[in-house]
Image (tube, rainbow, N blue to C red):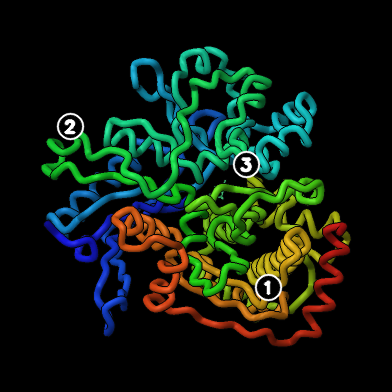
Amino acid sequence: MVSRTAQSVLAIDLGAGSGRAVIGRLTQGGGPDDLRLSMEEIHRFPNDPVRVGKHLHWDILRLLHEIKQAILKAVQLEGDRLGSIAIDSWAVDFGLIGTDGQLLGNPYHYRDHHTDGVMEEVCARLGRERIFAASGLQFLQFNTIYQLAALQAQQPGLMDRADKLLMIPDLLRYFLTGEMHSEYTNASTTQLLNPVTRTWDAGLLSDLGLSPSLLLPPQASGIRAGTLSPEVCAELGVPPIPVVTVGEHDTASAVVAVPAEGKDFAYLSCGTWSLLGTELPAPVLTEQALTWNFTNEGGVQGTTRLLKNIMGLWLVQESRRAWEKAGSRLSFPQLVQAAESAAPFVSFIDPDDDAFLNPGHMPEAIQAYCARTGQPVPASEGEIIRCVLESLALKYRFVLERTERLTGKRFDGLHMVGGGIQNSLLCRFTANALQRPVWAGPVEGSAIGNIVVQYMALGVWNTLHEARQVIRSSFPVRTYSPENVDGWAEAYERFRGIIGE
Ligand SMILES: C[C@H](O)[C@H](O)[C@@H](O)C(=O)CO
């Protein structure tokens, strides 16, 4: 029998652009309680959505194939040391399962336009106050609730045949184990789950005409949710490794990995999306939280993630994709370099303007925003990326200050985790805009949070506090201190004027 700390775990972390498989291991440091966490990426793969006619879908079977390749590699590397497997991914999207246990079609991508106008219709019917009181969630058109309402209206036959709804990690885990379970943190992103009772809101479901039997009871993270099925074991030639639930909403796992010391801290999970907020023992369901469109997503160990979605590096990713189509070959680091040498504080955008959710051509959408707000229109790649990064940093300040007003707390600085922290210009701009220190690290936030909760399920740690101590001593954190304070303070006033706040 391999001891708990000698076991390794396999974390599958699926982002909107790519997926990675990471082995987590524990090593004994100097003292008896001095554990060190290490991780090794063993498989990385693209997560390319597929357009079918007018609609955008996830290639879910391709993701399953890649996960199986990762399991093969992990077993080859770790043998019987491999104690468990767990999956985390982006939120809100799901697959529908028929009464025969089969998937009823490829999941929609949350940026697909089938939800255009649906949120407004549902809110007019049920009322934002009612929905917020029952769910505590921010209003975003791609929330699961509006995707289901869209399917009810556009594909009633499909909804009639749907027996169970499984969020992306639940669905992939079902394919691996044959067991259906619904994990809590991701369930909390549907806008159908009550953050106080932590169960599906029966009143909301009935008002929406959704059968409660469509949804499985939400289960906590850190529990065993099956083992690899006999079919998968036979196909891959591997043993029936346990599959456990973790913070399956990748942002929930990223928050686990924030190396904070105290209980009061502010975080920014930075990737395709930027999620900025704090960790609380209970949701904030005030009228102000509703007015400012904050969200109370479920966290690991019964915590609440009070946060706000900010459009994030999607603005840079989509700009680069547009320029690449036009033949430009600038890499992300080259784009950041060009932004660094562009003139400062020329024009700003509200990163969360609807125009940026899924425009055909992001640079043109940014230029159009600047033109319609009467600002100089950025022309070069460097000018456009600088406008984006400065605007993101200023929006981070705006959301951090509102988080403080909603909670009555004051944060000394901001923890930044996730792939986006490799953009050191963004980290610097953020410290400058906040006029407070930024502590950047770890990069692989979601994967580390996934690994940590697997070890908690193995009994290595009981509390997030204990686990975060080991994260702090295992992964580097870079501190960015504020510079050029005056320029940014004036920029912030202009920015607020432009976003109308
Ligand atoms: C829709 C986004 O995926 C979601 O709001 C965000 O929290 C996320 O999951 C980022 O990966």
Q: Which residue is mark 3?
A: 196
Residue 356 pos. (x, y %): 68, 50
Is any atom of residue 330 visible in this view? no
Where residue 421 appears, as percent x and y from the top left, is 52, 71
Among numbered discs 3 and 1, the one appearing first in the sequence = 3
* Residue type highlighted by circle 3: Val
Helix, strand or loop for disc 1: loop
Q: Is 80 displayed left or right of 453 in the figure?
A: left
Task: Answer with the quarter of the image where residue 399 lies.
Answer: bottom right
Q: Nearer the viewer, residue 156 or 376?
A: 156
Q: CA distance from mark 2 to mark 1?
A: 51 Å
Position of residue 157 relative to residue 250, above or below, is above
Question: Where residue 51 sits in the image (x, y, percent)?
Answer: 49, 35
Q: Which residue is mark 2?
A: 231
Residue drawn at 54 percent across, 72 percent down: 423
Q: Residues within 10 Å of mark 3 (few under 14, many from 20)?
A: some
Residue 94: tell me if it is visible: yes
Reading the image, the residue beneath label 1 is: 411
Q: Residue at x 77, y 54 (%)?
A: 368
Residue 269 drawn at (x, y percent):
55, 62
Q: Residue at x 34, y 16 (%)?
A: 100
Secondary structure at badge 3 equals loop
Label 3–label 1 contact, CB within 8 A: no
Instruction: Rate crowding at label 1 as few (under 14), some (14 to 19) or many (20 or more) other CA atoms within 10 Å.
Output: some
